[in-house]
Image (cartoon, rainbow, N blue to C red):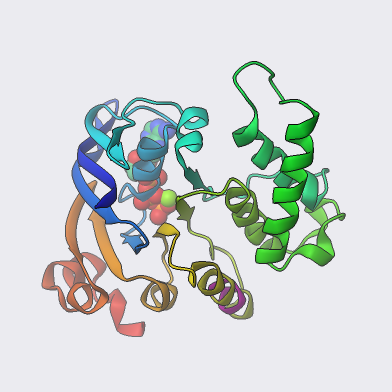
């Protein structure tokens, strides 16, 4: 059973076709990397799947349910959470407040904009659990803008995790991180994935991270999937090597 299935997903920005007929099937529990050069359409694929904007054409099914055209705040309730390529925090609020807000955004009912007091308590509880998972507990009460860039990226993952997702979508979680921060992020992600329940789609430029985490890789190039397979197949693919001009050699 596939947890996510996209069929001919297409997105136009004016005359630009940023995504073209993307077919993608992701199994439950799988860790899928989406790679491709700058401007390939990776973030656009994320945005079209999780409802930042509607796709121009095509369909997406999550757990068999048609989520095409739904908005992000509705899609999160089905169990898809994500992080953004650019850090996206409330800078003056504390670490735990940032996470509680993310959790609350999922927990609140349809009638109360922020949920009732029970929602606040539950959001805080989920925030504490997420802090533990991301090893950020010691930083809980610091303003988020005092954290290192690496910890801010982890905080964003904590915000997504606090929503108890079935599918977690990470857009370049190691962007701008030092080698040490990248390694500790990979270790934390591996811990997070060890239960095998969580499905992850990961956009990532660092090939070492990709080959370390991903079971399957989809390669986007100019809005199209040009290769799809396990890491060895993708590494060996001539079409991928051509698109990357040999960029895999360092990995
Ligand atoms: N909201 C938007 N409005 C107009 N054009 C957009 C928008 N978002 C993306 N694009 C364009 O769509 C194309 C794909 O962009 P996208 O951000 O998806 O690439 P990407 O693969 O995520 O690249 P990067 O690796 O640099 O993050 C680019 O040409 C980009 O300029
Ligand atoms: Mg991007």
Find residue 238 and report its horizontal and vertical position in percent: 12, 73
How many labels, in total? 0
Find residue 225 and report its horizontal and vertical position in percent: 19, 53
Viewer-side residue, 13 vs 120: 120
Find residue 86 and report its horizontal and vertical position in percent: 57, 49
On the rendered structure, is 109 left or right of 70? right
Magenta segment: 182-186
Residue drawn at 48 percent across, 55 percent down: 170
Viewer-side residue, 65 vs 72: 65
Residue drawn at 63 percent across, 59 percent down: 153
Viewer-side residue, 223 vs 32: 32
Find residue 138 and report its horizontal and vertical position in percent: 83, 66
**Magenta region includes residue 150:** no
Viewer-side residue, 146 vs 16: 146
Vertical comparison of 251 with 58: above or below: below
On the rendered structure, is 228 left or right of 188? left
- Tell me which secondary structure the magenta stretch mostly adopts: helix
Image quadrant in which the C terminus is located: bottom left
* Furthest-right residue in this view: 141
Residue drawn at 18 percent across, 46 percent down: 23
On the rendered structure, is 83 left or right of 92? left
Hey, which quadrant is residue 10 in on the image? top left
Can residue 187 be seen by looking at this rendering? yes
Hey, which quadrant is residue 36 in on the image? bottom left
Residue drawn at 59 percent across, 56 percent down: 157
């Amino acid at each position: 059973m596939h947890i996510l299935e996209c069929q001919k997903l297409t997105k136009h920005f004016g005359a630009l076709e940023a995504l073209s007929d993307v077919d993608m099937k992701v199994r439950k529990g799988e860790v899928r990397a989406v790679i491709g050069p700058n401007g390939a359409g990776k973030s656009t694929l994320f945005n079209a799947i999780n409802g930042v904007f509607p796709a121009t054409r095509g369909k997406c099914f999550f757990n068999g349910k048609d989520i095409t055209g739904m908005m992000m705040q509705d899609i999160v309730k089905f169990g898809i959470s994500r992080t953004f390529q650019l850090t996206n925090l409330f800078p003056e609020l504390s670490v735990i407040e940032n996470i509680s807000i993310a959790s609350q955004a999922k927990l609140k009912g349809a009638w109360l904009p922020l949920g009732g007091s029970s929602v606040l308590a539950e959001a805080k509880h989920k925030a504490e659990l997420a802090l533990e998972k991301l090893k950020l507990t010691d930083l809980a009460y610091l303003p988020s803008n005092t954290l290192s860039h690496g910890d801010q990226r982890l905080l964003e993952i904590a915000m997504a995790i606090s929503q108890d997702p079935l599918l977690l979508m990470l857009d370049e979680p190691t962007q701008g991180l030092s080698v040490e921060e990248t390694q500790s992020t990979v270790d934390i992600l591996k811990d997070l994935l060890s239960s095998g329940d969580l499905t992850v789609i990961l956009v990532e430029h660092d090939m070492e991270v990709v080959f370390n985490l991903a079971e399957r890789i989809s390669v986007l190039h100019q809005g199209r999937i040009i290769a799809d397979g396990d890491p060895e197949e993708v590494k060996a693919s001539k079409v991928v090597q051509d698109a990357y001009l040999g960029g895999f050699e360092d990995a």
